[in-house]
Image (spheres, helix red, strand yellow):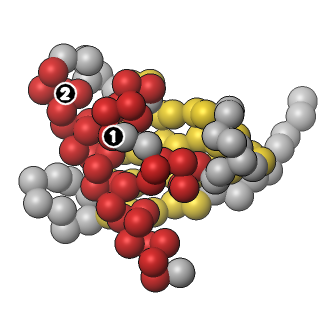
Amino acid sequence: MLLKHSTVTRIEISELPRLDPIRVYIEDYEPGRGRITISCYDAAWVGYWGAMYGQSIRDFFIDCHAEYLAGNMGCASSLSRSAPNRNYLIRVIKAVQQALREASHVA
């Protein structure tokens, strides 16, 4: 058995209009490779990118279109890929992008 430890950044975003609190877990494996997990209420989505041209997952996520990210994030919840649920995921992604942008300006 092989155990690996990594550093994970956890962010909680709350007090959003018409959205429950959002929890975001960011893992950078190495420059250009990383995973992000987003949960909101009882839904969760996971995305992994292995070729981000040396960017961190945070910077890559901020720079991408929400529609692209929604199309590439695996659905780990009971939500289907129907239009209303995809629109919900896009709203969640845009909220995460905004929070990450604001956090980048503060740091």
Q: Residues within 10 Å of mark 2 (few under 14, many from 20)?
A: few
Q: Is residue 34 above or below residue 79?
A: below
Q: Which mark is residue 85?
A: 2
- Give, as a three-letter code, the residue at label 1: Ala
Please state the horizontal and vertical placement of residue 106, each as a whole percent of the image. Answer: 46, 82
- Give, as a three-letter code, the residue at label 2: Asn
> Which sits earlier in the primary sequence, circle 1 or circle 2?
1
Please state the horizontal and vertical placement of residue 95, each as a whole percent of the image. Answer: 28, 55
Q: Is residue 21 above or below residue 70?
A: below
Front residue of this view, candidates 75 and 106: 106
Name the mark nearer the viewer: 1 or 2: 1
Residue 50 seen from this side: yes
Q: CA distance from mark 1 to mark 2?
A: 14 Å
Residue at 43 percent of width and 43 percent of height:
64
Instruction: Tell which residue pokes out farthest to the right in this image.
Output: 1
Secondary element type, mark 2: helix
Residue holding disc 1: 66
User: Which quarter of the picture shows residue 23?
Assistant: bottom left
Please state the horizontal and vertical placement of residue 31, each as a whole percent of the image. Answer: 75, 49
Residue at 54 percent of width and 55 percent of height:
58
Q: Are marks 1 and 2 in contact (CB under 8 Å)?
A: no
User: Which corner quadrant holds the N terminus?
Assistant: top right
Q: Seen in the image, is 65 located left or right of residue 7?
A: left
Residue at 36 percent of width and 64 percent of height:
99
Please state the horizontal and vertical placement of residue 13, each as a whole percent of the image. Answer: 32, 63
